[in-house]
Amino acid sequence: MRHIIGTTVRRILGIDDTQQPESQVRYLKDVSKSNKQISVSQENLFTFIDSVKDKHGIEEISLFRKGNAIFSSEDDLENVTTLYETFERTRPLMDKRLLMLKDKYWVTIYEKQEFIFIIKRFVKMNEIELNALTSDILKNLDHVLLEERNIMESIYTNGII
């Protein structure tokens, strides 16, 4: 009887006495230790994108900023641009995320800081996975873009293009 009254009171008052799932927390800590931190140091943009895709189990990733594509691992840039435009059109109607099933992939389009991420994956990404992916990219983005700028300047300066 005491248990029934206690349960009823907790539900009415909205008291949450659940405990943190220790086994899940330990598992996530173990997995995070085994995955080394992504570092771009002397790698180029394509190597960086491939390492992010491998680490997070992603098929394709694209990044936009102020309507311009910063990078995309997808070959069909027109498709990515269409997805970006769809997100821009629906943005006033929703929160900062759009999730759709397209051609057997889950496409997640979301905004973080001033960037728009477009992710294609066979399974949906949860909030923790999205935050980890975003963190890896944004942490290394300045260095990657600076390195690419230096490469392009060198190519133009040396008359290769």
Image (spheres, grey):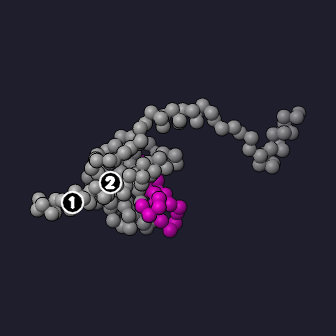
Mark yes or no: residue 93 visible. yes
Looking at the picture, does residue 27 appear above or below residue 68?
Answer: above
Quarter of the image where the C terminus is located: bottom left
Q: Residue at x 28, y 55 (%)?
A: 147
Q: Residue at x 16, y 63 (%)?
A: 156
Q: Is residue 114 magenta?
A: yes
Q: Which residues are magenta?
A: 91-115
Is 59 left or right of 129, judged from the image as shown?
left
Q: Position of residue 73 (x, y in %)?
A: 30, 51
Is 83 left or right of 45, judged from the image as shown?
right
Q: Dividing the picture into quarters, in which one does residue 39 lie?
A: top left
Q: Nearer the viewer, residue 125 or 68?
A: 68
Q: Residue at x 54, y 32 (%)?
A: 27
For marks 2 and 1, give the CA distance: 12 Å
Residue 152, label in figure: 1
Q: Position of residue 41 (x, y in %)?
A: 32, 47
Q: Which residue is labeled 2 in the image?
A: 144
Discs 2, 1 touching: Cβ within 8 Å: no
SS assignment at label 1: helix
Looking at the picture, does residue 115 appear above or below residue 37?
Answer: below
Looking at the picture, does residue 115 appear above or below residue 41?
Answer: below
